[in-house]
Image: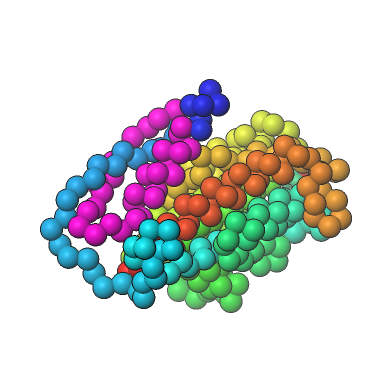
Amino acid sequence: MQHALQAVTERHALAFKLMFTRTPNRSYIVNNVDILGCRMMKCIEVEQTTRRQPGPPMTLSSRTGREKPSPKAPYIVGLGGTVRSGSTTDNALRLALKMATAAGAVTVQISGQDLNLPMYASEGLERTQAASRLVDELRKADGIIICSPSYPGSVSGYVTTALDYVEDLRGDVAPYFDGRAVGCIAVAGGWPGAMSTLDTLRSIAHALRGWPTPLGVPIVADKGMFDSSGTCLMPKVHEQIDIMARQVVAFASFRAASAAASA
Ligand SMILES: Cc1cc2nc3c(=O)[nH]c(=O)nc-3n(C[C@H](O)[C@H](O)[C@H](O)COP(=O)(O)O)c2cc1C
């Protein structure tokens, strides 16, 4: 089972890499397939007759001597948490972003009062400053990490309302969460709530055309899980958040590189 999951992760990463890698005179047809319940892609390489578009300055790879685009750090937006001070959900999100930063990303966290937004109104165009900032940050994002408490048995009102505002990205070239990796963390008092909330978060990511990472993280909150400095004292939770954060950064890197190449 572990090997099968590893294979799924590797194929998922490969599919993403192929999707966002520009190879001269080649492109990839990408089809959705379902493997072990994960949405996967089958990539078929095809010859392309069009010439490559001009890209950003190229650097020479020291290993191969071939041209490669200058790397751009992926931009990851973390949203979620609760307004409770010392919140497990906040700590989990902060840790995920810390790990994403360590993996090479530039990150921003939107949580606490920044998520205290008015209910989304699809017709009105007026937006509060906090709502405009949220939409602007998500527009810039190469990857997203969402961390929600389980209220009752599902995504909290704050997080759901924030996700409603993604509707403001509907007219973008990359609408909603299109092409973006989405890491999901659900924090609950018990496993049923953690799992149902995680499932809902992953379904929302799909509905918004995002790419839930192979690993989502369900957490059963425990008073001793994080110390006052935000260090996670439970190795298994620490490890799962780390794996998920690195998956988000890996996928987001392809998107960031692709955007840099076509700028
Ligand atoms: C309004 C409310 C509803 C909740 N419903 C559930 C639930 O249905 N299932 C569950 O496991 N935990 C439930 N919890 C517990 C929270 O999910 C848990 O305490 C939270 O994720 C951790 O909170 P913190 O981030 O503020 O530390 C609920 C908590 C509140 C305040």
- Asked if residue 211 shows in the view, the reply is yes
- Residue placed at 75% from the left, 59% from the top? 83
| Whether residue 174 is situated above or below residue 58 in the rendered picture | above
| Whether residue 236 is situated above or below residue 21 in the rendered picture | above
- Asked if residue 170 shows in the view, the reply is no
How many numbered callouts? 0
| Whether residue 5 is situated above or below residue 126 in the rendered picture | above
Find out whether residue 22 is within the magenta segment: yes
* Relative side of 170 to 53, left or right: right
- Residue placed at 33% from the left, 35% from the top? 33
- Residue placed at 61% from the left, 44% from the top? 243
Q: Position of residue 2 (x, y in %)?
A: 55, 26
Q: Position of residue 97 (x, y in %)?
A: 64, 58
Q: Position of residue 205 (x, y in %)?
A: 48, 48
- Residue placed at 43% from the left, 58% from the top? 63
Q: Residue furthest top?
A: 1
Q: Quick one: quadrant of the C terminus? A: bottom left
* Relative side of 17 to 189, left or right: left
| Whether residue 184 is situated above or below residue 139 in the rendered picture | above
* Relative side of 216 to 227, left or right: left
Question: Magenta span covers which residues?
Answer: 7-36
